[in-house]
Every structure is written in C-alpha cells, then in structure tokens.
C-alpha cells in the first residue's frame, strides 16, 4: 500500500528526474537520475533493523551530496569571478551577484547564501581533512561548516593545523563540542587574533525583531557578554521586587513588561508614538459581510509583518483612537482577492505614498527566498530602460538585492498580468516572485 506521503515523495522524485534528464547530458547528472529512481523504488516492508540501516545510509548519502554541492559551489564562484574579471568589471565589484545566484538555486536568502558560500570556499580549498570526512559521510554538512566558520579568520597555516587535529574527532563530537574545540584550538594558536575577533564581534551588536506565533513578536538583542548579563540581572531583580509586593503576574511576564516600560519610557503601549498599518477589507473593519472574519496583516514602523484575527484588529483600531499617541493607517484589499486596493483617505496620494504602498504591500524583500526588511522602493524595469514610476512597475527590495540586480547579466521584467516579477540571472535561469497574498499571509 502506498501512502499519501509516499505518493508525494514519488512526485518529488519524478520532478527531480525531469530536471536531470532534461539537462545537458552530463554523465554526473545521469547518475543522479539513476539514484533518484533507486530511491523512488525503495521497497517497503523492511523490519526496523533494516530501517535503521537505511536511515544511516541516507544520512551518509546526504553528507556526500553536501560535499559535492559545496565543491560545485566553490567552482561556480571561482568561475564567475574569473569571468567578471576578464570582462573588465572593476575589482571592487567583482563577485557582485554571484552568491545571489547560488541562493536562488538553493532556495535560500541572499544573506544566508553569502555566508554559506564563504564557508564552502574555505571548506573545499583549505580544510581538506574535514572535507574528506564530509565526503565519506562521517559528519554532517552543518558540523563541517562549523569548522569552516570558526576558522575563517585564522591564517591558512593555523587553519590547516586545526583541520589536522580536529577532523579525526568530528564523527564522535556533537555540534556544540565541535564549536568549542575549534575555538579552543584557535585561541591556542593565535590568542592575540582571537581577542581582536572578540572586539570586532562587539561592533556587530544589534537589535532585531521577528514575528512569532499568535500575534506575538521576538525582540532580540545581540550584546557583549557583560551587557547581556547585566540586562538579565536588572530585569530579574526588578521582577523579584515586584512579585514580593504581591503582583499576580508570572516572573516572565513581569520581566517582559519591565523591559517594555524601560525601553519606551512609557507604562502603556498607546503612549508610545508609532504608526500601525492594518491591511484588511472594509468588511473586516466594520464587522459586516462575508469577509468580516478574514485575518488582518499588521505592519508597524517597518517591523516584520504578522497576522492577527479580525476581531483583534478591530479592538486595536478602537484602542488606538482618541488620545493615543499611536497613529492607525488602514490599507484596504479587494474583497475576494489578496491584492491591495488603496490606503485610507488620511494618506496623501504623492510619490512618497506610492513608496509606502510598495513597502507595505511587499512587506519583505521581493527577491525569492529573501526575508530581509524592505529598504528600497525599486523600479522593476529601470526608468532608463523604459520603465515607468507606477505601482505595477514597483517592488520593495532590501539594499543588498537592489545592488545585486544592477550587476552585469541580471534583468527583471513585469509579467504581462502585472502581478509577477521575473528575475533572469546571468546564467539564464529565471525566478518568479509574486507579492504576498494578504488572504493567506503567515507570521
């Protein structure tokens, strides 16, 4: 009996086979197609002992595939950089757009792709023993990448020494142990450089906000160790004092509320100046009609979008009225559709508002797989190439992706239906991007 999951897996492999068989006839690609068929035709009914053997074998295969992918990545980056240099691209621009192509192929964000490419280059070229462990299926891709990450700042000689000492142990260590052992060896070999790296890390301190389930958010701060401990101690002390006075909240709730009060300087959120954008239908706003209970998308002062029930949005609209320092802006989408129709009448219909409309419509960078905040309102087809300054020809991009699309060989066009942006990379591959459907946006 073939389960629904089994049918889904079979369909996935058929798609893989199609991609392999429709390519250029590379023997390696043909071999992958044979492997795809072999995995698809896996016979059910094995006992649990065999299943464990298969799980281990598949894990080893996953490691081998990761090693091959890392090698392909390193060769692609080297080739692309050489081609750009030969084409006369200025030295400071060589490499632009290369990691973005890898990200699109791997279906990951440009930021993650850039980080991964750097690790691949280090792993393949300068960590031969660790790379061999990955090829042999003895360690996972992530564990090998930890070694590359923790040694990337060292000299080639010191990196080679850690590779020689650490690689034979990798298959017996957990991820955290690999990280700590790599750091220990790095400090032993170059203590001055290690301390300098810590100072550099302090320069990368920042605060970020990400959506969480149930209309919540995660406010995260990357801080030096002493600062982080000091903040935690201060919040804990304040919570203990409050609870000692008989407060009925939990300790975690008191710490969270104290954090908000001390950061904003206000005891009530409505006293904090902020603009809250509600993307909803008029039916959801007035609780009248077949879409009165449709979920509402919320974007506040450039924070990541999140989704809340219509009833919660209506309550927020009431709470943020009157003497509240918060400003509420409603953006209406067409009933029965996911696209935005207009902003409410309080907004001005100037170019600045068109920009705001794009930022709120797209919510995050429109590049496929990129979740970075929108920083630029961009022309899909540049004005110098005949593009017009319209909503249809506009998109929200992060700064990095806006620079990437300006690299040689990149092109973007608006699909004839006016709702899809088609990105063509220097290798001729195309990727399609559609603005979020505000019917089904998720936190």
Image (tube, rainbow, N blue to C red):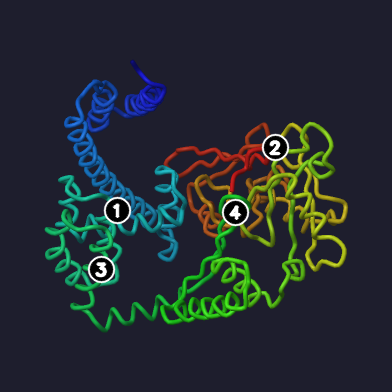
Q: Secondary structure at mark 3?
A: helix
Residue topped by disc 1: 142
Residue 410 position within the rendered picture, expressed as x and y whole percent measured from the top left: 51, 47
Disc 2 packing (10 Å; few <14; some 14–19; many ≥20): some
Q: Nearer the viewer, residue 169 or 261?
A: 261
Q: Where does label 3 land, which residue?
A: 180
Instruction: Determine crowd level at label 4: few under 14, some 14-19, many 20+ residues with C-alpha closer than 10 A.
Output: many
Mark 4 and 3 residues: CB-CB less than 8 Å, in contact? Answer: no
Residue drawn at (39%, 48%) of the image: 102
For numbered disc 1, what is the local secondary structure? helix
Mark 2 — residue?
338
Between the C-alphas of marks 1 and 4, the distance is 29 Å
Q: In the shown orientation, is residue 285 left or right of residue 52?
A: right
Q: Earlier in the sequence, mark 1 or mark 4?
A: 1
Q: What residue sits right under mark 4 in the picture?
A: 397
Alpha carbons under labels 1 and 2: distance apart: 38 Å
Q: Quadrant of residue 85?
A: bottom left
């Amino acid at each position: 009996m073939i389960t629904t999951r089994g049918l889904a897996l079979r369909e996935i492999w058929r798609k893989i086979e199609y991609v392999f068989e429709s390519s250029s006839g590379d023997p390696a690609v043909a071999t992958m197609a044979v492997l795809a068929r072999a995995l698809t035709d896996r016979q059910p009914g094995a006992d649990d002992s065999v299943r464990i053997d298969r799980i281990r074998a598949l894990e080893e295969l996953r490691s081998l595939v990761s090693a091959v992918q890392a090698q392909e990545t390193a060769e692609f980056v080297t080739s692309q950089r050489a081609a750009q240099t030969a084409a006369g691209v200025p030295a400071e621009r060589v490499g632009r757009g290369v990691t973005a192509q890898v990200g699109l192929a791997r279906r990951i964000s440009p930021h993650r792709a850039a980080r991964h490419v750097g690790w691949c280059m280090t792993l393949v070229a300068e960590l031969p023993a660790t790379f061999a462990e990955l090829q042999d299926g003895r360690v996972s891709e992530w564990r090998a990448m930890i070694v590359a990450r923790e040694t990337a700042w060292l000299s080639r000689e010191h990196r080679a020494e850690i590779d020689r000492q650490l690689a034979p142990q990798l298959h017996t260590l957990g991820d955290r142990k690999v990280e700590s052992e790599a750091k220990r060896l790095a400090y032993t070999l170059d203590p001055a450089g290690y301390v300098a790296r810590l100072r550099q890390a302090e320069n990368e301190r920042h605060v970020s906000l990400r959506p969480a389930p149930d209309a919540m958010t995660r406010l995260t701060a990357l801080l030096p160790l002493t600062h982080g401990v000091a903040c935690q101690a201060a919040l804990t002390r304040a919570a203990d004092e409050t609870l000692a006075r008989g407060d009925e909240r939990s300790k975690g709730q008191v710490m969270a509320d104290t954090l908000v009060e001390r950061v904003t300087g206000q005891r009530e959120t409505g006293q904090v100046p902020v603009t809250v954008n509600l993307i909803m239908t008029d039916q959801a706003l007035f609780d009248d009609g077949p879409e009165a209970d449709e979920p509402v998308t919320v974007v506040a002062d450039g924070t990541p979008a999140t989704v809340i029930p219509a009833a919660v949005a209506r309550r927020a609209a009431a709470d943020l009225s009157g003497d509240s320092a918060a400003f509420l802006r409603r953006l209406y989408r067409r009933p029965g559709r996911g696209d935005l129709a207009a902003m409410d009448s309080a907004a001005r219909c100037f170019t600045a508002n068109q920009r705001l409309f794009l930022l709120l419509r797209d919510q995050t960078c429109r590049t496929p797989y990129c979740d970075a905040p929108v920083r630029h309102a961009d022309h899909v087809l540049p004005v110098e190439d005949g593009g017009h300054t319209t909503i249809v020809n506009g998109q929200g991009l992060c700064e990095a992706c806006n620079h990437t699309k300006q690299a040689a060989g990149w092109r973007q066009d608006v699909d004839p239906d006016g709702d899809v942006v088609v990105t063509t990379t220097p290798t001729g591959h195309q990727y399609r991007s559609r603005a979020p459907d505000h019917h089904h946006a998720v936190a």
